[in-house]
Image (spheres, helix red, strand yellow):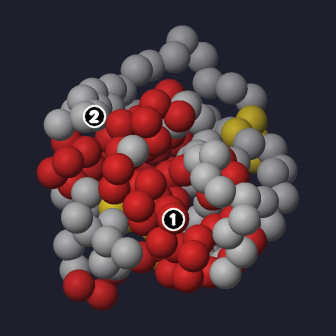
Amino acid sequence: MDPATTLPTNSLSHLNVKTLKALVRRLDLSKKLTRSAELLEALEQSRAKEFPLILDRLTDIEKKLLAEAVHASHPIPPSAFSAKYGAPLPFPLSPWSEDASLLRLFLFSRDDEVYLMEGFRDRLRSLLPEPECARITTVPTLPVAFTPEGRPWLKEIPRPIHIFSGE
C-alpha cells in the first residue's frame, strides 16, 4: 500500500468527538468519557481486547466489506463493492460523516475509496473468510432505465438505456 494512503493503527484520532462518543456508546463503554483523549484510549483498548466481539456486532454486509479490504491488495472502490454485492457501501466515505459504523475501527476512506488501517490485516485474515470472486451473470432482457446510486449529493435520476444494433 502506498505510504501516502495508509494510517497508523491508532488512526482513530482523525474522527471528531461526536463520532467517537457514538462509537463508545455502540460498544457499551463508559458513558462518563467526554474528552477526546479518553474516548480514543477507551476505543483503542476495546479494539485490542474485544476484537472478535466487535466483529460479531457487524452486519453481514459490513463483514463482507471488511473481508474484501482484508484480502485485497488494493483499496475498495464503492462501485465495485456495490456491483458485486448488490448493496450500497456500508461505510461513510466522507471524513466529516458522523456515522458511528464499527467499521471505522478498522477502515478509513480517502479519495472515495476504502482502505484497511495498518496492523489489522494478519489478525483479521484468520477471522474473516476470503470473499468469493465476482461473477458475471446475464439477464434475458435489459431494464428500460438505469438509476445510479451512491452519492447523496447527486440526484438519482433514471437514465434510459439505448440499444444499438450493429453488424
Residue at the image point whose x is 74% and y is 36% from the top: 145
User: What amino acid is at disc 2?
Assistant: Leu
Q: Is residue 27 left or right of residue 53?
A: right
Q: Quadrant of the C terminus?
A: top left
Indicate the position of residue 141 as horizontal and vertical percent values.
60, 17
The reply to whether residue 146 is in sight is yes
Q: What element carries label 2?
A: loop
Indicate the position of residue 89 as horizontal and vertical percent values.
57, 47
Residue beneath disc 1: 42
Q: Quadrant of the N terminus?
A: bottom left
Q: What element carries label 1?
A: helix
Is residue 120 shown above or below 10? above
Q: Is disc 1 surrounded by few (<14), some (14 to 19) or many (20+) residues within 10 Å?
A: some
Q: Is residue 111 left or right of residue 129?
A: right
User: What amino acid is at disc 1?
Assistant: Ala
Indicate the position of residue 8 as horizontal and vertical percent values.
31, 78
Residue at the image point whose x is 17% and y is 37% from the top: 126
Residue at the image point whose x is 36% and y is 37% from the top: 52
The residues bearing labels 2 and 1 have C-alpha atoms spaced at a distance of 24 Å
Pair 2/1: label in front: 1
| Front residue (pair 40, 9) | 40
Task: State which quadrant residue 134 falls in.
Answer: top left
Task: State which quadrant residue 4 falls in.
Answer: bottom left
- Label at residue 34: none
- Label at residue 128: 2
